[in-house]
Image (cartoon, rainbow, N blue to C red):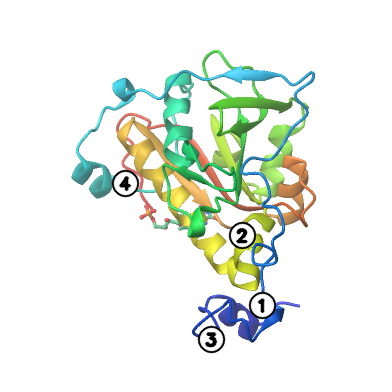
Amino acid sequence: MRTIESGRESMKGYPMAFGDDPRNPELHSDQRKGLAAPPVEKPYDKEGARIVALPSPSRAVVAKAHVMDVIGERVSRRIYADQPLSRDQLSFLLWATQAVRAVNADKTSSRRTVPSAGARHPYETHLRLARVEGIEPGLYRYLPLTHELLFLDDRPSLREELFVLTDREEWAADAPVFFLWSCVPYRGEWRYHTMSHKSMLLDAGHIAQNLYLAAEAIGCGVCTLGGYWQEGADRFCGVDGVDEYVVYLAAVGRVKTANTEGV
Ligand SMILES: Cc1cc2nc3c(=O)[nH]c(=O)nc-3n(C[C@H](O)[C@H](O)[C@H](O)COP(=O)(O)O)c2cc1C
């Protein structure tokens, strides 16, 4: 049962100066115990996988280049042009939010375009693509190690499921691109045990802010959603809700000309 007290506690820092204090073995992480690290990207069955290549991220899509303009003009946008996103634009947004710059030698962590506590990067990116030039509509997962998309499903109910899980938000269900970030909590727990959960939520904010700023730079708009039906979102992505669960959502589309909508 959620309570105000447990919610407040979960926002706080370590309960002691050294979270990994040797005198408190109940707080020892699996990393400290010498267990193998989980993979930096969720494995998938390569045989029969439908992979969609993405163009390399390119600054050619950037229309607003000055960082002061991008930060100063960012707003949440819930009205989008009908026009599809280009594959280059989608590639740019995925690069900005999760692209891998390096994997360490023992393949236990990655460095990406966003920060993450302990470089754990616990999120997977699910995408409902409704209108992207040259990509069949459907549900996909981003593969950050190779900058590709993994096709998951194109069941006809995707739009209706999204409508329901976003509490009947038409603009979200009809957005050309819809992000669902699911957390694989063991990636953080492996290193930080019970102290990992706060950090993993903070990580999601960095990802979403990069999406906001990257979209603003390329003539697109974003509105993130923290209000959604948990079970519906997990089922939508095909994750179990225990070892992986959705934490944050975002709708994306091209900015409608003369759209000055903000809050
Ligand atoms: C964590 C978080 C959760 C949010 N959840 C929703 C949401 O569920 N539905 C929605 O329409 N907007 C949502 N928003 C967008 C906020 O309403 C918006 O950021 C706020 O009104 C300020 O407007 P601005 O982003 O244009 O500055 C969310 C924003 C954040 C940061």
Circles 1 and 3, Cβ within 8 Å, touching? The answer is no
Nearer the viewer's eye, disc 1 or disc 2? 1
Q: Where is residue 149 drawn, in percent x and y? A: 61, 26
- The C terminus - image quarter: bottom left
Asked if the residue under mark 2 is in contact with the one under mark 4, i.e. CB atoms within 8 Å, the reply is no
Q: Is residue 133 left or right of residue 181?
A: left
Q: Is mark 4 within 8 Å of ligand 1?
A: yes
The residue tagged 3 is 16
Q: 161 or 8, which lies in front?
A: 8
- Residue type (three-letter) at the residue carrying disc 4: Arg
Q: What is the three-letter code of the residue carrying label 2?
A: Gly
Give the residue at x 46% y 38%. 102
Identify the secondary structure beneath mark 1.
helix
Residue tagged by mark 1? 27
Say whether disc 1 or disc 4 marks the residue closer to the N-terminus: 1
Distance between mark 3 and mark 2 Cα atoms: 19 Å
| Distance from Cα at disc 4 to Cα at disc 2 | 30 Å
Question: What is the C-alpha distance between the residues marked 1 and 2?
Answer: 13 Å
Location of residue 114 with respect to 131 vertically, above or below: below
Determine the image quadrant of residue 30.
Answer: bottom right
Q: Is residue 201 above or below residue 95?
A: below
